[in-house]
Amino acid sequence: MRHLIDPLDFTREETDRLLGLADRIWEHPAEYAHSCDGRVLATLFYEPSTRTRLSFESAMLRLGGQVLGFASSDSSSAAKGESVADTIRMISGYADIAAMRHSKEGAPFVASRYSAIPVINAGDGGHQHPTQTLTDLFTIRRRHGRVGGVTIGLCGDLKFGRTVHSLIKSLVRYEDVRFIFISPEELRVPSYILKEVVEPSGHTWREARAMEEVMPELDILYMTRVQRERFFNEEDYVRLKDSYILTPEKLCAAKESLSILHPLPRVNEIAPEVDHDPRAVYFQQARGGVFVRMALLLALLGLEKGVLDGEGA
Ligand code: NCD
């Protein structure tokens, strides 16, 4: 049985095959409309979510399966002090696969150790968010034809943003990716990611403080929200929250072929006028997340052979 806790739980080949399956589902959804008949997905969300939870639920429903779960910790027995380990043991009897979001780093990993069903990390604290990364890679591939060969600017809260951490981990496995990390000093990419992931990869990287400085170079601009819930005090959040605001004026210097991604939700970091720009692909990105999660459910449930290693074609 396989889980998806960290983006590196799947090899690059497995990841690419999964994205290929997502493409096929996108093009021929009717062929998959009953693939999960009789299967149940549990969504265990201890932290707020709109896209991730609903796209997982939509994915299972579109595959013919059913869903159950909770959308906040106060509506589950966590409020009474139940451990994640106990919860997942029981859920293993109620569902065939589970997606878990938790504010504590490592909670989905702990759950996977006690689970009898596949566990998917749907975001753990400021740590990882592997299914958002699959969605990001899927979007980049559909826009640029392949994942590698791009200059990507990651902008905003690179310290607490789990989507950024997972995306960097995955992107270093592709050829010819140049990273530009655009953040205030206080929200720089954590040094463990620079030292353990970026530097050993040999990929080119640098840091910038202003997005204007680097705009003309970028093929992808990955905007992120300043993660208010992970700050220790409100004052720091207020000081940093509007560090970057993408406007149509700033885009004048950008390439025509730029793709602007954002895992969403957005707060102030992208002005609404940018939404009309053909380079703004964040809503398409969110839509793609459903097909990616459909592919993931099929692969982890063993219903689509040949995607994950050890499951013959
Ligand atoms: C992200 C998350 O939860 O980490 N949202 C998402 O899943 N699409 C990004 C964020 O909350 O800023």
Image (cartoon, rainbow, N blue to C red):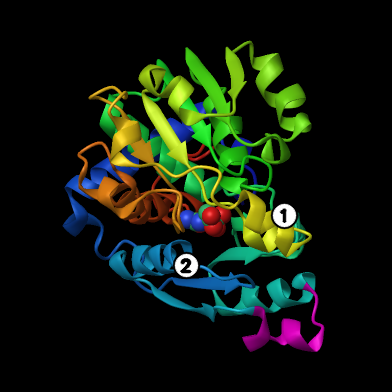
Mark 1 / mark 2, whichever is N-terminal: 2
**In this image, 191 relative to 151: left or right?**
right
**In this image, 150 relative to 166: left or right?**
left
Measuring from the top left, give residue 311's x and y in whole percent.
49, 40
Nearest the eye: 114 or 141: 141
Tell me if mark 1 has few (under 14), some (14-19) or many (20+) residues whose alpha carbon lies within 10 angstroms of its own. few
Measuring from the top left, give residue 6's x and y in whole percent.
64, 44
**In this image, 217 relative to 144: left or right?**
right
Give me the C-alpha separation between circle 1 and circle 2.
29 Å
SS for callout 2: helix
* Residue 53 numbered mark, or none: 2
Which dot, 1 or 2, sits closer to the camera? 1
Q: For the magenta stretch, what is the residue range?
A: 73-83
The residue labelled by disc 1 is 236
Which amino acid does the dot numbered 1 rest on?
Answer: Asp
Which amino acid does the dot numbered 2 rest on?
Answer: Arg
Residue at x 57% of width, y 22% of height: 172
